[in-house]
Amino acid sequence: LQLNDALNYVRERGRLDGKLLAEKISETYYELNGAEPSLDELIDVFRRIKDELAIEAEQDLVQQGYVKDTRDNGSALYLAKKLGSDFTSASPSDIIDYAFRIVKEDFISRSKSLFKSTKGRLPNDIELKQCVESLALKLASEAVEASQINEDLQSEYDSVADPDYD
């Protein structure tokens, strides 16, 4: 019952505020254009206000983490545009997400290219997944191998006596 009363109050208040807003918009329109706005022009102004408020509300919800950015198509390009040219204000998780998206897009592109060069056609979803997994395993294997080589080199370097520091 209290919720219905509150909703009714908000609706009534909105009607009154809407009338005042329409009068203010009409006055401002008249001051700028020297004529009263037509009904279509007034409706267009309200539509634009509504659209801008909806965009602003969605951005607030995205920033607060309540909803996912619906414009985010998962691409590195989208995230780069969102973060802007200066990544210094980006959070570490945004930087990691950006790097992940670049690698993901590169794997997809390389897998499609590799598959097409060997089979003469683009892969279906299952074939693409298998090709990406194969490339990912190869990358992981090479990364572990390179890490072990770097550790071995560091161990050898650390064990060599430096006459300047003895």
Image (cartoon, grey):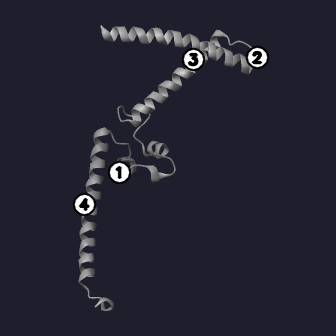
Give the secondary structure at mark 1. helix
Image quadrant holding the N terminus, namely top left
- Distance in Å between CA atoms under marks 4 and 1: 23 Å
Amino acid under disc 3: Phe
Q: Nearer the viewer, residue 56 or 123?
A: 56
- Res. 118 mark: 1
- Distance in Å between CA atoms under marks 1 and 3: 58 Å
The residue singled out by tag 4 in the image is: 141
Q: Residue at x 37, y 34 (%)?
A: 68
Q: Nearer the viewer, mark 2 or mark 1?
A: 2
Q: Residue at x 30, y 53 (%)?
A: 135
Amino acid under disc 1: Thr
Q: Residue at x 50, y 9 (%)?
A: 15
Amino acid under disc 2: Gly
Q: Which residue of the protein is positioned furthest toward the right in this rendering?
A: 34
- Res. 34 mark: 2
Q: Is residue 165 above or below residue 106?
A: below
